Image (cartoon, rainbow, N blue to C red):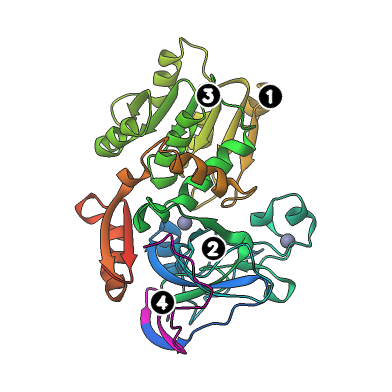
Amino acid sequence: MHEQHFLTNEFVVPERMKAWVLGGPDEIYLVEKPVPEPNVAEVLVRIDAVAICATDLEILRHGVPAMVEGGLPFHKNLTIGHEYMGTVVKLGTAVDEYRIGDRVTVEVHAGCGRCARCRQGMYTSCLNYGDPAKGHRANGFTTDGGFAEYAVNHINTLVHVPDDMTDEEATLVVTAGTSMYGLDVLGGLIAGEGVVVTGPGPIGLLGVAVAKALGADPVILTGTRDRRLELGKELGADHVVNARREDAVAAVRRITNGRGVHFVVECSGAPEALNEAAQMVNRGGRICLAAFPQHPVPVDLASLARNNIYVFGIRGEGQSATHRAMALMKQRRFDARLIHTHTFPLDELPTALKYARERIDDAIKVVVKAKC
Ligand SMILES: [Zn+2]
Ligand SMILES: [Zn+2]
């Protein structure tokens, strides 16, 4: 059904749509609002599926996190949801890269395209973040996102979805893209090098999968929940370490015959994680922080300096990493579907959010779909 492309638009786009919007903290309402119009370089996407992210739960409770200096005020009436996919149903006047009927999945950030960081491909660190007048969009953060029937997306944020990929799997591409970006900032050439991933959340689990697909050896996953660690093995971890039973640093040292690894991707946000990562890497090693603790934590700076250890932070999914993640997923280099656990209809979003927040029934990635 997806291979046909039509010269005329067979998708009837209504004037109004259903959309979930933020009320106060922990309040979300289903309302009707106008279907947005795509600008010259944008398309209108009919949203077919959206995955819930821990960040959605964070925004729902506390507002948009410190994406701009000092954070944004609580954004009433914003439609959140940033890990979505769907079908292109309307084109902006200058769009020929996509056609009506194309299935697409999205990245979150359309940088302004004019600041120094955007010019470097670091559009998730756009210097005009949160300024739509300058062309910046971060759907689900500063501009309307995916818990709705339609959304507009700049073409820079779109990735084609192959016909044989399910809607649910396609929602996971941006998560894999974030893991990929973490490995990119560490230097990218990880074949034959040891990688430790700390924290088996969605980004950590797909971090394992991407690292393995790129040839890292060994890939070690640390965490505290056996079921998640087992999943990590299915996604490519050569070794898993349950930090409740064994000291994670000692385990990494043991597995690597005392040498440590070149790279750590920190996905747990645990307060001690950076200090532990610094003991897992060898001299000159590199650590990427893909998660962070809620509050400032003491860090052993001397060990970082003395051992020439590099620490990188990442924001989201820059440098077109999402396209590289899609390339791996399209080639079935790993099965991201393993982390999708639940699906609910869009109308039941509050239940879906509850499953994700409380990890009911071992929920990992909970997806909502327009049509289940
Ligand atoms: Zn997310
Ligand atoms: Zn920019």
The quarter of the displayed image where residue 343 is located: bottom left
Residue drawn at (38%, 31%), measured in percent from left and top? 222
Q: Can you identify the residue that label 1 sits on?
A: 308
Which quarter of the figure is the C terminus placed in?
bottom left
Q: Is residue 12 magenta?
A: yes
Q: How many marks?
A: 4
Kind of residue sitting beneath label 4? Glu
Query: Which callout, 1 or 4, points to the residue nearer the camera?
Result: 4
Q: Where's ligand 2: which quadrant?
A: bottom right
Point out the tag, 1 or 3, that comes first from the N-terminus: 3
Q: Which residues are magenta?
A: 1-29
Measured in 3D between alpha carbons, the distance from the residue under mark 1 to the one under mark 4, in whole angstroms, is 50 Å
Q: Which mark is residue 65?
A: 2
Measured in 3D between alpha carbons, the distance from the residue under mark 2 to the one under mark 4, in whole angstroms, is 25 Å
Place of residue 17 in the rendered image (x, y in percent of width and height, measured from the top left): 42, 84
Point out the tag, 2 or 4, that comes first from the N-terminus: 2
Secondary structure character of the magenta stretch overall: loop
Query: Which callout, 4 or 3, points to the residue nearer the camera?
Result: 4
**Residue nearer the viewer, 14 or 296:** 14
